[in-house]
């Protein structure tokens, strides 16, 4: 569905998102409930991926990928010499950048509040009483 | 005291909702067509980031900075859903959120840009909060670049710091690789603004015409990719709209004089505005900037061909008594807009002397106030910054940031700061 290929949220983005609903202390990570997931092609850049890995929460990425059914054989633990393994980097690349959520929502793990994802754009605005 | 603060905050939220968020929502279709130029300094800042960096553009709009550097991961955020959607359609990673409550973990971004955003916050405290919230999401050592509209412009100066700026639709060169004669071929209700600029009501010198043509061809290619969104105006009003818009456009740039009888007539129609507690100074209505503003990019240069000296800044009267007691340097200048644009003639604008405003107390702009030049829905609120104000704001209130550099760029104050803790 090429037409819709631009409308998506990547797992790299999800990795950074947290809930700031008032009173919530553990708003991370958000649980993904995806009703529509797409795979896309993104040019592989090993340096980019390798530099990105230390910036993300690895276990959250693994869990998110698993939830979407795209974990494949990505290891749950980060191998120590990942920079030198192109094979590994490609797998990470795929999960970070090529698995995309079109429709669904992100759920705060503590309050249960759901943030919708519409046409690939998460809406994280809080209502007045939630701020 | 707390109640007063809460009231002020509520007023601020209300004002921003009305004169920032809803304006952007309504004008998003225009902005999607207008490919604003990316500021070179911002581009440079982005290109200097290390490959593999995580960057956030807070208030990204249509996402013009999100593809400057392909070696970094660019995440765009905007409060305005329609704008975010445009950015998304352009292939960018975006989300909708509030600058004051960013949905990110602490310390994740290597760099943040905030270009033409925090000047839309109507309270100093909210501007501080916005900066602090962005700082929270930055890794130590990370850089933030902030651009805000400057009080001091190249050939003029805003008279006040809290202003409403009409959004000038004519400055959007919508569509058009076709000539103006072909505009009839568009679907009913489609507004092609370019022919209006050439109407006999509207003078334009050759330089400007050429530049406008060049601008149209530049935007034509981009236009196709973002899709069409037409302003729906009933056909019977279209002709009126066209001719009166031309007139109103001109009146934005030229002052007219008033005679006593028309003055009296207008005074009678002025309605008092509601005053709310706590708001001190009047917010000022200004003409569209003749220079490059944040949003207009280099389309501002379209105005360079204009021959006009006046750049009056007007303040609305708050009640009849006040308007009647005009003295000395105050006078009754222009009526904005022409006959066919309703309600403008009900407005009186006073020219005032410069009043210094170091704080951002807001005017009580009545929700019921008459529309102005048919732009009631298109008045954007800005707090324009003085020289040094942004740096001072950060130095005094955001301990986690340390100023790296500061400059004036195209009518904006630009500050770069580093996260130190």
Image (spheres, coloured by chain):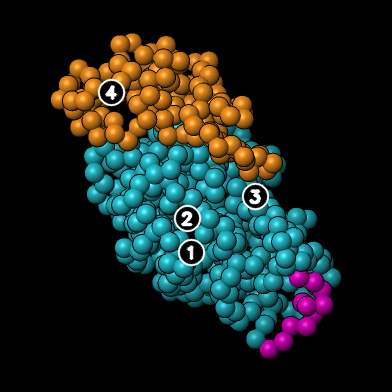
Q: Earlier in the sequence, mark 2 or mark 3?
A: 3
Quadrant of the image occupied by residue B224: top left
Q: Secondary structure at mark 1?
A: helix
Q: Are marks 2 and 1 in contact (CB under 8 Å)?
A: yes
The residue wearing badge 4 is A78
**On-image quarter of the C terminus of chain B:** bottom left
**On-image quarter of the N terminus of chain B:** bottom right
The CA distance from mark 2 to mark 1 is: 9 Å
Which chain is rendered orange in the image?
Answer: A
Q: Find the magenta span and give its range.
A: B318-328
**Marks 1 and 4: which is nearer the front?**
4
Residue B339: where, in percent of width, then height?
71, 60
The residue sitting at 50% across, 35% down in the picture is A18
The CA distance from mark 2 to mark 4 is: 35 Å
The residue wearing badge 3 is B17
Assess whether residue B321 is covered by the magenta stretch.
yes
> Do we see residue B135 in this rendering?
yes
The residue sitting at 26% across, 37% down in the picture is B52
The CA distance from mark 3 to mark 1 is: 25 Å
Which chain is rendered cyan in the image?
Answer: B
Seen in the picture, residue B73 relative to B404 is either above or below; the reply is: above
Tell me the crowding category of disc 1: few under 14, some 14 to 19, or many 20 or more residues within 10 angstroms, Cα based. some
**Marks 3 and 1: which is nearer the front?**
1
**Residue under disc 2 on the same chain as residue under disc 4:** no
The residue wearing badge 1 is B397
The residue wearing badge 2 is B131
Chain holding disc 1: B
């Amino acid at each position: 569905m090429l037409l819709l290929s631009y409308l998506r949220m990547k797992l790299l983005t999800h990795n950074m998102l947290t809930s700031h609903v008032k009173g919530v202390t553990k708003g991370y990570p958000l649980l993904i409930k995806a009703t529509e997931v797409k795979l896309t092609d993104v040019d592989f850049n090993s340096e980019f991926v390798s530099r990105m890995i230390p910036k993300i929460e690895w276990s959250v990425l693994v869990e998110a990928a698993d939830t979407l059914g795209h974990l494949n054989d990505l290891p749950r633990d980060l191998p120590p010499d990942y920079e030198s393994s192109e094979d590994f980097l490609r797998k990470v690349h795929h999960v970070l950048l090529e698995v995309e959520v079109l429709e669904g929502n992100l759920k705060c793990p503590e309050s249960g509040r759901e943030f919708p994802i519409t046409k690939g754009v998460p809406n994280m605005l809080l209502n007045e009483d939630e701020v | 005291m707390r109640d007063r603060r809460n009231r002020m905050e509520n007023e601020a939220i209300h004002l921003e909702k009305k004169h920032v968020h809803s304006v952007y929502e309504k004008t998003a279709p225009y902005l999607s067509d207008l490919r604003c130029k990316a500021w070179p300094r911002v581009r440079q800042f982005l290109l200097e980031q290390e490959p593999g960096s995580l960057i956030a553009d807070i208030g990204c709009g249509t996402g013009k900075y999100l593809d400057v550097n392909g070696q970094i991961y660019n995440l765009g955020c905007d409060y305005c859903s329609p704008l975010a959607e445009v950015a998304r359609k352009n292939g960018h990673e975006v989300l909708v959120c509030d600058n004051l409550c960013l949905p990110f973990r602490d310390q994740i971004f290597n760099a943040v840009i905030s270009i033409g955003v925090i000047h839309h916050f109507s309270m100093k405290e909210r501007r501080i909060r916005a900066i602090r919230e962005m700082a929270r999401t930055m890794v130590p050592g990370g850089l933030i670049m902030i651009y805000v509209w400057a009080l001091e412009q190249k050939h003029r100066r805003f008279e006040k710091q809290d202003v409403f700026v009409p959004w000038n639709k004519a400055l959007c060169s919508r569509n058009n690789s076709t000539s103006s004669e072909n505009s009839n071929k568009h679907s009913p209700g489609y507004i092609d603004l370019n022919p209006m600029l050439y109407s006999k009501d509207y003078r334009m010198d050759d330089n400007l015409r050429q530049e406008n043509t060049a601008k149209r061809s530049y935007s034509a290619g981009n236009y196709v990719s973002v899709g069409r969104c037409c302003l729906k105006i009933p056909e019977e009003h279209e002709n009126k709209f066209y001719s009166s818009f031309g007139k109103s456009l001109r009146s934005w740039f030229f002052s007219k004089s008033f005679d006593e009888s028309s003055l009296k007539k207008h005074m009678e129609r002025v309605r008092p505005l509601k005053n709310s507690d706590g708001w001190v100074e009047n917010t000022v209505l200004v003409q569209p900037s003749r220079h490059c503003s944040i949003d207009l990019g280099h389309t501002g240069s379209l105005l360079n061909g204009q021959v006009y000296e006046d750049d009056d800044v007007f303040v609305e009267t708050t009640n009849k008594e006040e308007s009647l007691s005009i003295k000395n340097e105050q006078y009754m200048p222009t009526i904005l807009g022409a006959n066919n644009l309703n309600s403008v003639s009900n407005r009186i604008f006073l020219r005032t002397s410069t009043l210094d405003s170091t704080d951002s107390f807001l005017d009580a702009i009545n929700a019921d106030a008459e529309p102005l030049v048919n732009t009631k829905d298109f008045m954007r609120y800005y707090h324009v910054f003085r020289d040094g104000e942004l740096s001072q704001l950060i130095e005094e209130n955001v301990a986690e940031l340390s100023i790296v550099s500061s400059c004036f760029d195209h009518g904006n104050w630009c500050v770069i700061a580093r996260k130190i803790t």
